[in-house]
Image (cartoon, rainbow, N blue to C red):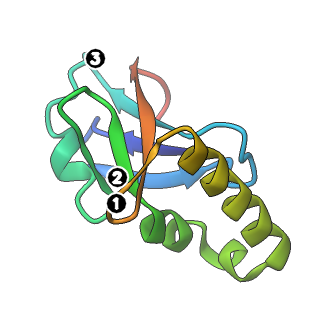
Amino acid sequence: MYVQVDLRSAAASTALLEADDFRSLKVVVLSDDGNTGGLAEALAGVGTVDADGHACLLVEALRRLSGERAADPEWLAGFDAMMDYARARGWLAAGPSLRAHLESQQGGPR
C-alpha cells in the first residue's frame, strides 16, 4: 500500500493506493520538478515527515483513507498483521503512526 501525494497543482492531493498490498508501505510524492516542498502541508491530517526524511503515517488516517475496506474483517486482519510486523521492526511510533519510505517521482500523467 502507498500514500500518493500529488504536489503538481496548487491544491495538493493525497490518496491511498494499492490498499490491499500489506507487504510494503511508502509515500510516493509526485511533482513537476522533483521538489518535495509542500509535502509536510500536504500530509497534514495523514502524517508527518521526520528528521531522517521518512514519513510517519497515522494509523487511523490509513484506515480512514482505505474507505469501506476498513469494515472488512479480512482487510483488517491483513492491516493488523502489517502493524505487528512494523512493531516488531521498530517502525511503529507514538500516535500511533507507521514509518514509511518517501519516494519522489517527477512528472507523469495527471
Residue at left offset 37%, top offset 43%: 5
Tag count: 3
Q: Is residue 70 above or below residue 81?
A: below
Check disc 3 and report its element: helix, strand or loop.
Answer: loop
- Which residue of the protein is positioned furthest toward the right in this rendering? 74
Q: Earlier in the sequence, mark 3 or mark 2?
A: 2
Mark drawn on residue 34: 3
The residue type indicated by label 3 comes to Gly
Q: Is residue 39 above or below residue 105?
A: below
Q: Are marks 3 and 2 in contact (CB under 8 Å)?
A: no
Q: Earlier in the sequence, mark 3 or mark 1?
A: 3
The residue type indicated by label 2 comes to Ser
Gap between marks 3 and 1 measured at Cα: 21 Å
Q: Is residue 89 above or below residue 105?
A: below
Residue at left offset 33%, top offset 65%: 95
Q: Earlier in the sequence, mark 2 or mark 1?
A: 2
Q: Nearer the viewer, mark 2 or mark 1?
A: 1
Q: Are marks 2 and 1 in contact (CB under 8 Å)?
A: no
Gap between marks 2 and 1 measured at Cα: 11 Å
Residue 89 screen position, x and y as percent: 55, 38
Residue to which mark 2 is pinned? 13
Check disc 1 and report its element: helix, strand or loop.
Answer: loop
Q: Residue 33: name its quadrant.
A: top left
Q: Residue 24: name its quadrant.
A: top right
Residue 109 screen position, x and y as percent: 49, 29
Residue to which mark 1 is pinned? 46
Q: Position of 36 compared to 30: left or right?
A: left
Query: Can I make out residue 37 in this image?
Result: yes
Residue 90 screen position, x and y as percent: 47, 41
Query: Can I make out residue 11 in this image?
Result: no
